[in-house]
Image (cartoon, rainbow, N blue to C red):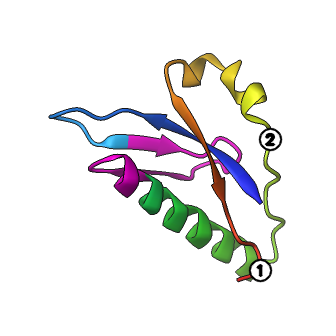
């Protein structure tokens, strides 16, 4: 399933930040764009593993268009991240 992730660009003093709007409480960071994406993929997969263990439903993914209307994500770059739910 494709989940949109919101990326806040880092700089010399700050890491790149990543948030998963459809997975409350799921966020990560990395030293560069590639690291941030890899770290948030691990965060999502770990979050989903805990939900599955608890018998909780996995959150549905909404469209990027829906999230771009939220002022919280103003200035973010969006990526659709493939999460394999068959693991």
Vertically, is 21 above or below 87? above
Q: Say whether residue 24 is magenta.
A: yes
The quarter holding residue 53 reads bottom right
Horizontal side of residue 4 vs 34, given as left or right? right
- Can you tell which mark lies on residue 86? 1
Identify the residue at horizontal 81%, vertical 77% (top origin): 55
Give above or below for 84 relative to 86: above
Task: Judge from the rendering whether residue 32 lies leftward or rightward of residue 65; answer left or right.
Answer: left
Residue range (magenta): 17-36
Residue 54: % across, % down:
74, 77
Label number found at residue 72: none
Q: How many marks?
A: 2
Tag 2 or tag 1, which sits nearer the N-term?
2
Estimate the x, y position of residue 79 in percent, counting from the top left.
59, 42
Image quadrant in which the N terminus is located: bottom right
The residue lying at 35 percent from left, 56 percent from top is 35
Q: Position of residue 67 (x, y in %)?
A: 70, 29
Q: Quadrant of the C terminus?
A: bottom right
- Estimate the spatial distance between the alpha carbons at disc 1 and disc 2, rounded to whole Å: 20 Å
* Label 1 Cα neighbours within 10 Å, binned few <14 / some 14-19 / many ≥20: few
- Side of 67 where 46 appears, left or right: left
Which residue is denoted by mark 2 in the rendering? 62
| Disc 2 secondary structure class | loop
Q: Quadrant of residue 45?
A: bottom right
Residue 24 image offset from top left, x and y in percent: 65, 48
Rendered residue at 82%/52% (across/down): 60
Callout 1–callout 2 Cβ contact below 8 Å: no
Residue 38 lies within the magenta run: no
In this rendering, is residue 2 above or below 52?
above
């Amino acid at each position: 399933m494709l989940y949109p992730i919101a990326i806040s660009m880092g700089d010399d003093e700050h890491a790149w930040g990543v948030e998963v709007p459809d997975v409350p409480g799921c966020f990560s960071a990395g030293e560069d764009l590639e690291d941030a994406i890899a770290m948030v993929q691990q965060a999502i997969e770990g979050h989903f593993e805990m939900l599955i263990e608890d018998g909780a439903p996995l959150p549905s993914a909404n469209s990027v268009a829906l999230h771009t209307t939220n002022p919280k994500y103003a200035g973010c770059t969006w990526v659709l991240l493939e999460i394999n739910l068959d693991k």
